[in-house]
């Protein structure tokens, strides 16, 4: 399938998928429905994604394509998580995990276990979720997937934040931060610093909160996540008179410099208009 599909108009791709199915090209149709589902997921259109994954799954089941069934079940489970359909997500991801394990797909099984952790946490089963998180962490460690390890630890920390267990939350997120630094994932570093800043703020440590918010803003900026960079930077700015003078002077230079560099929303919108290519909408046949 064309690598450019992610840049295409989903409606046109769906028309081609339907045409492929009608002409008997089931494998192509299933792949296209799945691809459009992932495209909808990337823009947070979860209902549309769910429908696409269901259509893809039905075709793969008719074809008795075990690999396609397994992969699409996982995608469907993730969509159900985002729709907060917790029971359905748990059932779907458990089925996907078993299929991955049966086919000796350790990476897929780790992803499905991670999904199960998020689904059970969403349902409110904290202890069961922690069991799944730890299993996923061990699996990712065995696979050498440090990005997966960091993401799991970060979500565990976030779960403890939601329970206002600040000590465990802070220690856990610091572990995630260490891994993010090791793999040079700047957006991950930014997320961890921002959350640690929240914890420091809640604990009354305004100096630490300001420092962490500044570091988060720097990393969001370098990741080109400009809207959140500015938001976090403003939070640091609000703390300037609540921190020691020496810290204020040190951070002031960074805040002013970064504030000048982060594009305003109007600039970002103008850039988006300049970059739009109408030829993207002219979808060609997929390979």
Image (spheres, rainbow, N blue to C red):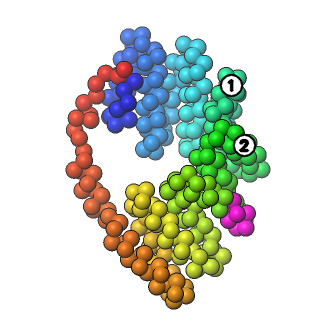
Q: Name the residue rendered at 42%, 15% in the picture.
A: 21
- Element carrying mark 2: helix
Q: Nearer the viewer, residue 214 or 159?
A: 214
Residue 6 is situated, as x and y percent measured from the top left of the image, at 38, 35
Q: Are marks 2 and 1 in contact (CB under 8 Å)?
A: no
Q: Earlier in the sequence, mark 2 or mark 1?
A: 1
Nearest to the observer: residue 85 or residue 257? 257
Residue 61 coordinates in the image, percent (x, y): 57, 17
* Label 2 crowd (10 A; few <14 / some 14-19 / many >=20): some
Task: Name the residue carrying label 2.
Answer: 138
| Residue at disc 1, secondary structure | loop
In this view, the residue farthest toward the bottom is 245
- The stretch drawn in magenta includes residue 169: yes
**Residue 104, disc:** 1
* Crowd rating for badge 1 (residues with CA inside 10 Å; few <14, some 14–19, many 20+): few
* Numbered tag placed on residue 69 in the rendering: none
| Placement of 214 over or under 7, stated as above or below | below
**Dividing the image into 4 quarters, which one contains the N terminus?**
top left
Q: Which residues are magenta?
A: 165-173
Rendered location of residue 205, percent (x, y): 62, 79
**Residue 265 vertical placement versus 253 (above, below):** above
Residue 158 at least partly seen: no
Residue occupying image coordinates x 54% and y 18%: 60
Confirm whether the magenta stretch covers residue 22: no
Horizontal arrangement in the rendering, residue 282 relative to residue 174 (left or right): left
Is 131 drawn above or below residue 177 in the view shown?
above
Q: Quadrant of the C terminus?
A: top left
């Amino acid at each position: 399938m064309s690598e450019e599909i992610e840049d295409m108009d989903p409606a046109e791709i769906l028309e081609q998928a339907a045409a492929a199915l009608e002409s008997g090209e089931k494998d192509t149709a299933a792949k296209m429905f799945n691809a459009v589902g992932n495209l909808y997921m990337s823009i947070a259109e979860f209902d549309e994604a769910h429908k696409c994954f269901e259509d893809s799954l039905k075709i793969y089941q008719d074809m008795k394509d075990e690999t396609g069934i397994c992969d699409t079940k996982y995608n469907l489970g993730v969509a159900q998580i985002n729709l907060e359909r917790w029971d359905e997500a748990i059932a779907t991801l458990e089925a996907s995990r078993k299929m991955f394990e049966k086919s000796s797909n350790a990476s897929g099984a780790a992803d499905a276990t991670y999904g199960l952790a998020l689904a059970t946490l969403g349902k409110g089963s904290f202890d069961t979720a922690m069991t799944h998180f730890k299993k996923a962490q061990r699996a990712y460690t065995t696979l050498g997937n440090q990005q997966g390890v960091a993401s799991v630890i970060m979500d565990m920390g976030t779960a403890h934040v939601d329970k206002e267990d600040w000590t465990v939350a802070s220690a856990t997120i610091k572990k995630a931060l260490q891994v993010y630094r090791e793999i040079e994932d700047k957006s991950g570093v930014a997320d961890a610093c921002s959350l640690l800043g929240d914890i420091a703020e809640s604990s009354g440590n305004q100096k630490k909160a300001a420092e962490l918010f500044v570091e988060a803003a720097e990393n969001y900026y370098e990741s080109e996540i400009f809207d959140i960079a500015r938001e976090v930077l403003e939070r640091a700015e609000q703390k300037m008179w609540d921190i020691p003078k020496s810290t204020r002077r040190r951070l002031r230079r960074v805040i002013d410099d970064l504030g000048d560099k982060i594009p305003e929303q109007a600039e970002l919108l103008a850039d988006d208009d300049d970059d739009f290519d109408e030829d993207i909408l002219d979808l060609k046949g997929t390979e």
